[in-house]
Image: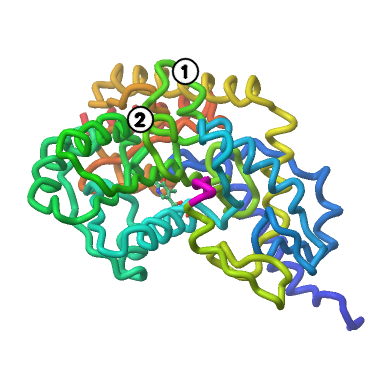
Amino acid sequence: MEAGKLHEKDQQVLNDLLENVKKQTDLFLGYPVSKDFDYQALSDFLKYPMNNLGDPFVTSTYAVGSRELEKEVVQFFAELFRAPADNWWGYVTNGGSEGNLYGLYLARELHPKGMVYYSEATHYSVQKNLHLLNMSNIVIRTQENGEIDYEDLEHTIRMNRHMPVIIMANIGTTMTEARDDVAKIKSILKKLAIQHYYIHADAALSGTYSALIEPRPAFDFEDGADSIAISGHKFFGSPMPCGVVIAKKSNRDRIARSVAYIGSVDTTITGSRNGHSPLFLWYTIKRLGITGLKTRAMHSLATAAYTEQKLKALGIAAWRNMNAITVNFPTPSATICKKWQLAAEQGNSHIICMPNVTQAHIDLLITDLKAEIVLQD
Ligand SMILES: *Cc1c(COP(=O)(O)O)cnc(C)c1O
């Protein structure tokens, strides 16, 4: 065998994997990732060890990276989320979970004795992050639709009003895509005369398009958030997981620490940082612009409305939150769940109408569901 060349049987392993990935990508309605991207134009960048280690806004001695583009990506989201014009900062993360960890980390540095409040419907990674950060926390009940129960929140904060309040608000919960209303939460804090508080918005799923729809949900900096995290591989679409976190620069400054070895400032969670993922986000922003992104959002909402109506026509109890691209319904058979990769939790499943999902996909699923209903009768 020639050195450096793959053995035939190893090549076959790769070919088989590629086939399987292609096939599994086709039938994919249960998880919130877009698949309608084409980053071939960026493939030459795979030849280089791009690494944005350190703070994107402070140059590093390590110069093979995409900092300049990363800064543009951060600026795009800071403006989209109406961050204070002279007081924003952020970076491209490895995903929504890291952005949430970052928000909680900032909150803890500002309010070491704070109590974290988050709803039952919060993403599973948040509890782990609270454990990592060793922060006191209380789970708040949710309403039927997955939104935080504001009465329970108010009551619980009242019982602990001697402690600073840290809120992890969900802007699109994992199961039902419910949005907690940040303005409403802020009014509760005001009513209880809470002096010290921090609100982080977990907008992993719905962040980008929440800023593009009417009526605009209350979730961003102007509504009262102190930091916002999104996932880049969800609505935008990316071959590898990534995300963005936006925070107030004044808060970031409190944790900044200069590191001689990298010639930059250590303000992020990890050391080495993916230098390729900012390219994907930048490319999509430049190619689509706000108008293109809005078109994608409208397409997703229309597909969701279509899905809800088709399921209901079959006699299935489907429903969705206002302006949500997630359609909820009772979990179908194991065969259908496996084929369409539908998650199930306590008898509930969902279809997430990401921008790549079309009515044709939905029609195929509906055909499968219909066939099972006929069999049962
Ligand atoms: C996807 C998601 C996360 C986690 O984001 P990753 O990008 O997978 O790390 C957190 N919260 C919510 C609501 C999500 O939908």
Q: Position of residue 202 (x, y in %)?
A: 40, 45
Whether 343 is drawn above or below 350: the answer is: below
> x%, y% of residue 204?
45, 44
Q: Quadrant of residue 6?
A: bottom right
Label 2 belongs to which residue? 327
Residue 77 in sight in this render: yes
Residue 373 quadrant? top left
Question: Is residue 249 highlighted in magenta?
Answer: yes
- Mark 1 crowdedness (10 Å alpha carbons): few <14, some 14-19, many ≥20: some
Q: Which residue is mark 1?
A: 302
Between 186 and 236, the residue placed more toward the observer is 186
Vertical relation: 270 (above or below) 182: below
Q: Which residue is at 68% across, 53% downward?
A: 57
Name the residue at 23% across, 57% down.
Answer: 115
Could you tell whether 242 is left or right of 59 in the image?
A: left
Q: Nearer the viewer, residue 319 or 273?
A: 273
* Region in magenta: 245-250
